[in-house]
Image: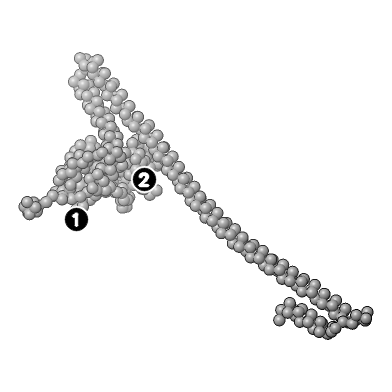
Amino acid sequence: MTSTETTDQVKAEAAAAAGPADPTDPTDPGDYAKAILNVLDDAGQEQRRQSESQRAMQNILEDLETEKTRLESTQAALINMLDDLEVERRKVDKTNMELREVNEAMRNFIATAAHDLRSPLASMVGFSSLLSKNWATLSDESRLKFVTTIDRQSHKLTSLVNDLLTLSSIEGGVLTTQPEQIVLTDAISQCLAASGQDTGNVAVSCSPDLVVQADPVHLARMIDNLLQNAFKYGEPPLRIEATSLGDIVEIRVIDHGPGVPPEFEAKLFGKFARADTPSMRQKKGTGLGLSIVRGLAEANSGQAKYEPNVPHGSCFIILLPSDTASSPTDERSQQ
């Protein structure tokens, strides 16, 4: 039974007890009953007000709980946004660091390229001037020496210009390839003969009937770049290995030098890439050779990669398609 029902019951009992009022009795109990009824009415109204206040407080508490939940949700969303912003900030920092490294590599390349361009030109201009002014007084031996120097420097200059043009063609997507069947032993022998290096410590392991399908100029360029890289940064003995892997021919150029620092391996085939080590700082280079090797390999449907040599040194690998020409039987069947 509710408090309101109790009050109503008490009021009913008080009214029944009061009975009909006697107007001549100043102390009529009915007056007391009416007073009690008034008090009970006031108490009922107060109870109703308290109930309404309680309901209002309950609604306020519910609204506060809803607002708390909403604020917690907003807080979680803000925390997620801050986390996302932190991730993006780290990405921007990483990109900025990479851009700084590229800019530094570019500056080093420009300085090296300017030196490599200026030195051969100065040498060629100087010796050609000496020849033209003193031809009659120079001995045949001096003339040959000067001409040989001019020839060597012109080849050096041509090599640098070719590197720049090749890289530009690769990046511009305008490099043309003319693949053909090439006997790999012949290509390797020609590269060794034209390397201008002492190749007595270079061992070659290649089957005489191993054939690849590639542009001959590009193949010679790839092998020569890897050879020059091994001569410059590696140590003897050097080794060239070529093996057939089904439809793929694998060419390895191996040296026994210090190898590539592990932290630099991911950047090895990038443009202007040069490891920042004391031994590397002492050796001049544009950092284009390996980038060109990768670009030419991919242009000939192959790839270039690196792996450490065991127990030490470097192993650069070129993967190219093997001979894909149809056999005479296949050609007749197609006809």
Q: Position of residue 161 (x, y in %)?
A: 28, 32
Q: Is residue 127 visible?
A: yes
Crowd tier of the residue under label 2, counting other residues whose Cα lies within 10 Å: few below 14, some 14–19, many 20 or above: few
Q: Please give the residue where the numbered disc 1 appears in the rendered image.
A: 246
Determine whether the residue tagged by mark 1 lies in a helix, strand or loop. Answer: loop
Determine whether the residue tagged by mark 2 lies in a helix, strand or loop. Answer: helix
Q: Residue at x 57, y 56 (%)?
A: 75
Q: Position of residue 323 (x, y in %)?
A: 15, 50
Q: Position of residue 80 (x, y in %)?
A: 52, 55
Numbered tag placed on residue 267 in the rendering: 2
Q: CA–CA distance between discs 2 and 1? A: 30 Å
Q: Nearer the viewer, residue 318 or 324?
A: 324
Q: Position of residue 185 (x, y in %)?
A: 16, 45
- Tally of numbered discs: 2
The three-letter amino acid code for the residue at tag 1 is Gly
Q: Earlier in the sequence, mark 2 or mark 1?
A: 1
Q: Quadrant of the N terminus?
A: bottom right
Q: Nearer the viewer, residue 6 or 332?
A: 6
